[in-house]
Every structure is written in C-alpha cells, then in structure tokens.
Amino acid sequence: MFNDIKTSLLQIYQCIFKPITFTDYENSLDKKSKLRLLLKLSLVSFIFSIFTVSTIRIISFYFFKVLFDWTFLILFTLVPLCSVVVGIVVGIARGKAGGIAYGISGGIAIGIAGGIAIGIAGGIAIGIAGGIAIGIAGGIAIGIAGGIAIGIIISIARCITFGISEGISEGISEGISEGIALGIFVSIALGIFVSIFFDISVGISVGISGCISFLVFYSRVFYILPHLIQYFRAKFSNDNPFRLFRKSPIYWDEIIIYPLPFLTDFLLLLTEKDRNKGLSEIEFVSAKRPTQRKAAFNALLQITINDLSKLESIKAIPDASGNVSFLSSFEGFLPKEFNRTLRIIDDLSIDVRNYLNSSSNYNKLKNLNNIESDFIDIKKSLIATKGPVGVKFLSLVETWSQIIEEEKKQFKRTDMDSFEEIPNPYIFGNPVKADNSSRLFVGRKDVVELIKSNLTSNNSQKPALFIYGRRRVGKSSVLVNLHKLLEKQYIPAYIDFQDPKYGESQPSFCYNLSKVICDSLNDRGFSFENPPLGSFQSNSFTTLGNWLDKTEELLEKENRLVIICFDEYEKMEECIQNGSLTTAILNQLRNIIQHRKYFVVLISGTNEFSELKINWSDYLINTKLIKIGYLSKDDARTLITNPIDDFTLNYKGGQDGETVNQIINLTNCQPYLTQAVCFELVNYLNSQCRKEACIEDVDLAAQKVLGSANAYFDYIWNIECTDEEKEFLHKMIKNVYGEGNEREINSLLRKEFIEKVDGIYKFKVELVKMWIKKNSLLN
C-alpha cells in the first residue's frame, strides 16, 4: 500500500516536472493500462488536493481569522474532481502524448486553486513575494502560509504540462508558446472567477499574481542559482565536474524553459576533462533536454572550431573530415546551416588532399586555383549565414585561405626553377563541357545544325528528335552543351536516365521531370516553381499536365521552347520491364509531342528502336533520326594539337605529320579513344620532362589506354557482341573469315566494329583489335 502511494506520488511528480519521461512510459502502455494508471493517479491527486485545500483553509483561519465557510470548501473540493474527469476524457479522446498528464496536473492545479478564493488579501501579497523571491521550496512554504502562492504556482502545472507535452508531439517552440498563452489565460480566468464570488480587488490580485507566478514557475528561473553554484564549483574546485553536472538542475527537470547561463561553458568544461564523456553529456542535453538544445549546439560548434583551428598547415587540412567525424551522432539535432557548412569543409579537405596527391605540377596548380575559387564562394556563403555558424567558421576559413595563398606563392617559386609541365586538359569518360578556353568539345556542327533545322520549322507540332550513336561517341556531350550551342529562345532540360530517381516510380518520374524543367527555366532567369513531390502521389499525370499548362503560358508569353532531353533512353525501357514504371510514361511523352506546342522531346541512346522490346515507334511518332558518329579528321587534329590555349605539347612532323597521323590511325577519330590516347601521352611526356612527341611515344600511350580504358573495351565486347559476332571477329584477326556470315557482318557494320574498305572487311578502330589480341580472346 505504502509503495503504491509512493509510486503514485513519484508519477505525479513526473507529470509536472518530467513530462517527457512520463510520456515515454505512458506510450509504452496499452489502452487498458493507461486507463488504470489514470484512475489511480486521479484518486491520489484528488485526495492530495482536498488535503492541501483544507490545510490552506486552516492556516488562513489561524493566521488571518478568516471564517470557515463549508460552502466554499465543498465547492473548491469538487473542482479538482471535475478536472480529473475532464482529464480522463482528454486522455482517452486525444490519444496523444501527455493525455494522462493533463488530467493529473489539472486536477491538482484547479483543486489547490481553491485556496485562492478562500485566502485573504494579506495572504495574496505574502504568497506572491514568496513565490518569486525564494523559489520553489521557499515559495511553497510561504505560499501555503499566505493561502495564495501555492495555489497559483501549482495551478500552472497543468499549463506547463500541456505546453511541454504538446511540444513533444507537435514541436517544442509551438508547445512552449501554447503553454505560456494557456497559463496566462487560466490565471486571468481564475481572477474573473474569484471576482464573481468575492470582491473584485481580490479577483484582480489573483489574476495578476497568477500571471507573475506562472511565468516564474514556467521558465524555472529559480534554477539559475543552483545551476551557477554547480558550474562555478566545477570550474574552480577540484570536485568531479561530471558528478556536479549530474546533480545540477539540468538533470532534475526536463522542462527548464529559461536558457541556463554558462551551460555551454559547463559542457565545454566537461569535454576538456574527458572528451568522450563530455560528448555523451552534450548528446544527453541534445536528445533529452530539447529546451536547452541551443547550448548543446553552441558547445559542439565551439569544439568543432577548436579542433579545426589546430590544422595550421596545408598538409593538416585533409584531416578535417576525421576531426569532425564525432558529429555524426548529432546529425539529427544540428541546424541545417551547420550541416551545410560541414559538408563544404569536408569537400574542401578532399580538394586539398587531391592537390597534395597530384603528381603533375599542372594538376597541382589547377587544384590550387580551384581551391582558391572555392574559398571565395565559401566566404560569400558564410557571410550570408545568420547566427554563430557564419561568424565562427568565417574566421577559420580566413585562416585557411591565407595558408592556401602562401602555398600557391611557394609553389610558383618552386615551379619557376623546374620543368614546366604540359597541361593535361583531356577528359575521357565524362561528358565534355564547352568553355571559352577549351576546344575539347570540337566538331558536331552538323549535329547542332540538324537539331536547329527541326526546331525552327514552321509546323506547330515539332517532331521528336532521336540522337543515335554508338557508345562513347559524344552523345551526352552534345546534350549537356545544348544550352551554349543553341539560341536563347531554346531551353534544354537535361535528364540522365542512368540516375535511378527518374525510374523509382511514376510519381517520382513526374516530379523529377517537372523539377528539371523548372530548374532550367530558373537558370534562364525565370522565377518558376514546380509542385512538391507529395502532390504527385495520386493522379501523377493530371498534376503534371496541369503544371505543363501553366508552364506553356509562360513559354508562349516569353516566346521560349523547352527541349526535354532524355539521355540513355534505353534505361526507361528497363524500368518499364521491371515494373517501376509503366507504358503510361510513353503515352505522356506522345501527348507532349502531339499537343504541347512549346515542348520538344529529344532522346539519345546507343540502340535503335528495332533493337528494343517495346515498340517505341508507336509512342515517339514522327521521330527524326540524327546520327552522331566519329569526329572528322580536321576536328580530331584540333583536339590533338590545340585543345586549349597555351598548349605546350609539340608533335614531331607538326599537325599533319606522322605522329599526329598515328593517333588518328589508332583511334579512327573515335572521340573517347582519341582523348584517352592524348591523356596518356601528355602524362608520359611529363614524366620524361619532354615536350615533343614522336610515334614511339604514341604507341606507348596506346598500350596504356588498353588498360586504362578497359571498361569501355570490355563493355563493347561482352555486352554488345553476340557469341557469333565474337567468333567472326576472331576469324578476322586471323584473316581466315569467309563468306556466308551476312547476319553477323551486317550487325558488326551497324555497331561500327568493322567497315568495308576496297571490298575487304577490317576493324574500324585499330585499338579495339589490339585490345582483343592483348586480352587473349582468340581462343
């Protein structure tokens, strides 16, 4: 019996002072257990309320000779019972966190509030003074003696519990604001209630004292003194700081609204004593004391800055990623601007590591220039970032920027006395992007002109376009550069279907399609928004269609045409085959082709429609085929000899000499392989400290390409070739093939493995033949 009462009083205490803990316990119970718990605690709180009201009444009579009135005593004894009943209804009906706490704390609060109406003016004054000046313990004692403060202070417990419980389920800041508003409302309402039954001056006193006492108790300002005592003891004494921290108010009470002073410093002090234990305490505050989370964040911010500030040389900066790895456990509690800045720092450390690992002086200088440019962007971003994150990280970035600047000066002084390396601008594998100083993206004028001629036709219904070409011939490079190759009225929206987000589901496809179009419009200076992902979950195509209607209104007004570019369109068929998409997607594209005057559909891929399972011609009607092949010899010579300004590589024999011709003979101007050979050639010459290439150098670079471009060769051999075609290529290498293989020959001609020259079939690209030989595939 005694243990049950003790447990009930502890749970009532948790309702008022530790609602988060109590709510976690409440949520672990089933509905029947919750109801039993509510009834048990309601009974105890009801008895406690009657006892307290009676005590207040007796003290009022003893000290102030207030006559005993049974009418009012019965009235204010029944009030908590009504409140408990309301609490039961709320707890059952709401089914939300804090339902029981509402009833329990409300029953105690309103019941003890009876002491207010029965008290006298002198009791009011003493109660207010006691509640504010002394804090919880002294306030209760003097409040009981005065007959008012304890009534007000405990009456607001319901409001406190309401605010925090709502904070758990609906957001801390919203819960706090609701709690404050409700607390003041209850105090004023209580004052009006008292005014009706008693004197109006007493009612006003009750209302004012209620508001003041509520704000004092709600913010828990009386915890400041014991908190400061523990902090200064930890700072200036030899006591165990962790023991003192765990005996401070931050562990007593879960809902201290008022920011505790020096809490950040207290947490930093703990990490100085023992980093791991200190971080555990910061994690505790972040997770279990949401109203003090800002102090925990400030402590983490300062720890991060302190750690990163120790990286005082360029060789130390790459360690930044490891230095902030401890923050991963706090990711859910950190502000987004802090997380964003950490990602920037992480990227910066990777760039510095790449600089340090670069074997080429050209690449080192290029990386340094990129890092320097990144620092300028980071500074702008941090200046625009509000709060302590921007200020503290800006100081760190300024220091690092000076380190990079000094490194660049030192590098240039060293570089002046050494061999000046040939810059290596070549790219093989990723799409090549055109810029003012680079001619890596060369040729393709014929392809661009064909696209333009179809876009400028007078027909209201523009044809769909299909850019077809074998693997690694530059299809993606054309698409990603369309915004620079076409006039401003054309707005390309590039979609790489190798990105899995486009094939996750039909809502995802429709959302990402609208987002890409919207982003492309915004890049051209238009202010436009696409619907959120949630709006596509039902009726995806209706939502997309309505949005396209609005988009066309803008395009018509501004005389613009959006080109929707689907790269690697075959992946779309794979998604349809595996069920993540349906042919409704293709019907949507057909609708755009037929009925959207200001949209053009462009697809690119390595397979013709006839090679796929779906009958694409039924959907992409009136499609114009634009074939993209190898570079012309003139364009290939430009790429080989003059890819960028100030290119310092010379070829024996000049632009039309035997060395350049050897690269053309080996690659047949295939863009990917041409760049691959040139890339390896530049690296080899730099390693030899030479600037002139000869045929032997090209042959050596070609051997390196057979290894570095192995993924390309392996794909075209194992994925694109059938067994019969492989056998035919074996015979070609042995020069023993005969007639009667028309099917394989036609397929290999279409796939550009072979070509017919003077009536004889030969490999179109010599490097492919060399790769087959080297990898012992003849058997």
Image (cartoon, grey):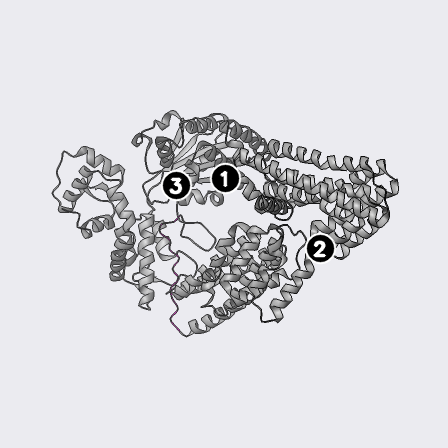
Mark 2: secondary structure: helix
Q: What stretch of residues is rendered in magenta?
A: 418-430
Residue 256 in the image: state x and y as whole percent: 65, 52
Residue 40 in the image: state x and y as whole percent: 60, 38
Mark 1: secondary structure: helix
Label 2 vs 3, first from the N-terminus? 2
Label 1 vs 3, first from the N-terminus? 3
**Alpha-carbon span between mark 2 and mark 3:** 67 Å
Horizontal placement of 188 versus 652: left or right?
A: right
Residue 725: name its quadrant: top left
**Alpha-carbon span between mark 1 and mark 3:** 15 Å
Label 1 vs 2, first from the N-terminus? 2
Residue on which the image places disc 3: 498
Residue on which the image places disc 2: 137
Q: Residue at x 67, y 36 (%)?
A: 84
Circles 1 and 2: CB atoms closer than 8 Å = no
Badge 3 crowding class, 10 Å Cα cut-off, few under 14, some 14 to 19, many 20 or more, is some
Magenta: main secondary structure equals loop
Residue on which the image places disc 1: 516
